[in-house]
């Protein structure tokens, strides 16, 4: 990547403001495994980092302290002898002595990476860090960055911490995978030049996780790349699913069970349905697991149109997990070449339709920009009509309810070419819209929009029915 930082504009703004603010800053950085947390901090702050310490997985406190001493020795140019501290309180005393010897006009920057591996049980790392912050750091021009992939630990011990770090976090970064604009720029920076249809296919299987995207091969189609990554003996993501969740969450069994439940019900489940489907006891631990999954970007909440808060649905929106559950989990032994066959099946059509819809829901700012309503407040939802004795049920993929008395209804379709609306489809759409208006009693103007990979081919059936039609290109706009 040649130290190029693609995208991440909001996150870079947070880091910049922390440098320029008049007081001490403590920043927590949370994100899923391999999303680029360390790269973001190391690349943005570069030579400004005065001390960096990365925890070592599954090693004792003594080993972590020895690593601390080694890192301090590398940056401390004074004549002080660097010894391995007995505990973290002593380690932070050594760190303070080093920092007091610095002559800087700008802020001091400290970076503690893989924090959960440093702050092991009975290590007292967090209390020592809290004392260091409260007794010394808060009085100085300093930025302390705390980063970790173990999402459940970071949320519990840093975001919701009631001890030494309580209310000490001044800024938070929840680092998400790349959107399509960033993904395209990232791939181009690696000299991987795919057209947008290929990129969308890759994104539906891999998401925007930089580490996954880095292993793509130039000169191979999306189908060939996916086949190699997931189905070959040496495929990077062949065994990623279990590793991913156990690396992020303590006691990840519940997290995986919820992901599997949502993977089997693609239109979403309520909290009550999740508890029933997973045979959980209806306690606070379910809320904690759901919160951790949402913080980490694996699931999203959606409120069906006209429903109150109790009607919220949870949906699996992590592309990689959805792909894995759809085509790899419990599917028996598969080999390289499997995806070429699977991509021609009905299962593929079902998955691709939902996956593309999920990708679109993650790009609401781009969709609003295409509509020309970026500055108008809106609420996004879906709509499900279960049907009755007079009319069959139907679902509307996306509704954008605007403050200017308009509702945009979106039909979202993944196709390999332009789509057109047949006469019977136009009739069905008019019935759906009429039924939606009658059921919801809305007095707002309703517009029908199409969002497809290659756009809508205009015919007499779409004229007067579809207000605006868009191709996947709008999803690649910078938000």
Image (tube, rainbow, N blue to C red):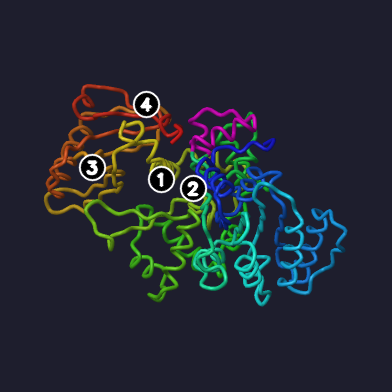
Q: Earlier in the sequence, mark 4 or mark 1?
A: 1
Q: Is disc 1 in contact with disc 3, using a CB cutoff of under 8 Å?
A: no
At a point 25% along the width and 43% down the height, the residue shown is 401
Residue shown at 61%/49% (left/top)?
A: 237
Label 1 or label 2, whichever comes before in sequence order: 2
Residue 389 drawn at (x, y percent):
12, 53
Give me the C-alpha separation between circle 2 and circle 3.
31 Å
| Magenta highlight range | 180-202
Element under disc 1 = helix
Q: Compare residues 263 and 371 and report the one nearer the observer.
A: 371
Q: In which quarter of the image is residue 277?
A: bottom left
Vertical position of residue 303 compared to residue 115: above or below: above
Q: Tag on residue 418? A: 4
Kind of element beneath mark 3 = loop
Q: In which quarter of the image is the C terminus?
A: top left
Callout 4 crowding tier (Cα within 10 Å): few <14, some 14–19, many ≥20: some
Q: Which of 232 and 187 is in front in this view?
A: 187
Camera-side mark, 4 or 3: 3
Residue for badge 1: 358
Which mark is nearer the camera, 4 or 1? 1
- The answer to whether residue 281 is seen in the rendering is yes
Q: Label 4, secondary structure: give it.
A: loop
Residue placed under numbered mark 3 in the picture: 403
Look at the numbered discs 1 and 2 and tell me whether their residues touch, using CB distance below 8 Å. yes
How many angstroms separate mark 4 from mark 2 (CA)?
A: 24 Å
Regarding residue 346, the answer to whether it shows in the image is no
Give the distance between the C-alpha atoms of the residues marked 4 and 1, in whole angstroms. Answer: 20 Å
**Label whose residue precedes the other's in the sequence (1 or 3):** 1
Q: How far apart are marks 1 and 3 (CA)?
A: 24 Å
Q: Regarding mark 2 in the picture, which secondary structure is present there? A: helix
């Amino acid at each position: 990547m040649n130290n190029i930082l693609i995208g991440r504009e909001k996150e870079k703004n947070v880091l910049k403001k922390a440098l320029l603010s008049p007081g001490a800053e403590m920043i927590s950085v949370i994100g899923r495994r391999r999303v680029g947390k360390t790269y973001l901090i190391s690349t943005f702050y570069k030579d400004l980092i005065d001390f960096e310490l990365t925890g070592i997985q599954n090693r004792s406190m003594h080993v972590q302290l020895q690593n601390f001493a080694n890192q301090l020795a590398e940056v401390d140019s004074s004549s002080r002898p660097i010894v391995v501290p007995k505990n973290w309180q002593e380690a932070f005393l050594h760190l303070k002595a080093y920092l007091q010897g610095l002559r800087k006009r700008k802020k001091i920057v400290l970076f503690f990476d893989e924090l959960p591996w440093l702050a092991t049980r009975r290590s007292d790392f967090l209390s020592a860090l809290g004392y260091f912050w409260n007794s010394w750091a808060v009085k100085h021009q300093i930025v302390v960055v705390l980063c970790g992939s173990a999402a459940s630990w970071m949320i519990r011990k840093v975001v919701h911490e009631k001890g030494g770090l309580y209310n000490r976090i001044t800024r938070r970064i929840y680092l998400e995978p790349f959107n399509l604009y960033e993904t395209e720029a990232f791939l181009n920076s690696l000299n991987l030049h795919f057209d947008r249809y290929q990129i969308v296919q890759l994104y539906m299987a891999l998401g925007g996780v930089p580490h996954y995207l880095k292993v793509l091969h130039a000169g191979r189609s999306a189908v060939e790349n996916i086949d190699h990554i997931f189905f070959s003996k040496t495929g990077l993501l062949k065994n990623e699913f279990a590793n991913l969740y156990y690396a992020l969450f303590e006691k990840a069994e519940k997290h995986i069970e919820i992901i599997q439940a949502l993977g089997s019900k693609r239109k979403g489940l309520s909290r009550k349905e999740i508890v029933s489907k997973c045979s959980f006891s209806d306690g606070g631990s379910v809320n904690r697991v759901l919160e951790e999954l949402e913080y980490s970007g694996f699931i999203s909440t959606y409120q069906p149109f006209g429903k109150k808060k109790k009607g919220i649905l949870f949906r699996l929106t992590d592309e990689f997990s959805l792909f894995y559950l759809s085509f790899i989990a419990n599917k028996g032994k598969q080999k390289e070449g499997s995806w070429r066959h699977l991509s021609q099946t009905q299962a593929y059509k079902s998955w691709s339709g939902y996956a593309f819809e999920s990708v679109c829901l993650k790009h609401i700012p781009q969709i609003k920009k295409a509509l020309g309503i970026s500055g108008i407040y809106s609420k996004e939802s879906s709509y499900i009509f279960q049907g009755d004795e007079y009319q069959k049920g139907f679902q509307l993929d996306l509704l954008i309810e605007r403050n200017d008395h308009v509702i945009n209804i979106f039909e979202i379709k993944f196709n390999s070419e332009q789509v057109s609306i047949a006469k019977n489809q136009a009739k069905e759409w008019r019935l759906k819209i009429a039924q939606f208006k009658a059921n919801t009693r809305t007095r707002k103007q309703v517009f029908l929009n199409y969002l497809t990979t290659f756009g809508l081919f205009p015919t007499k059936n779409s004229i007067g029915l579809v207000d605006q039609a868009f191709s996947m290109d709008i999803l690649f706009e910078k938000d």
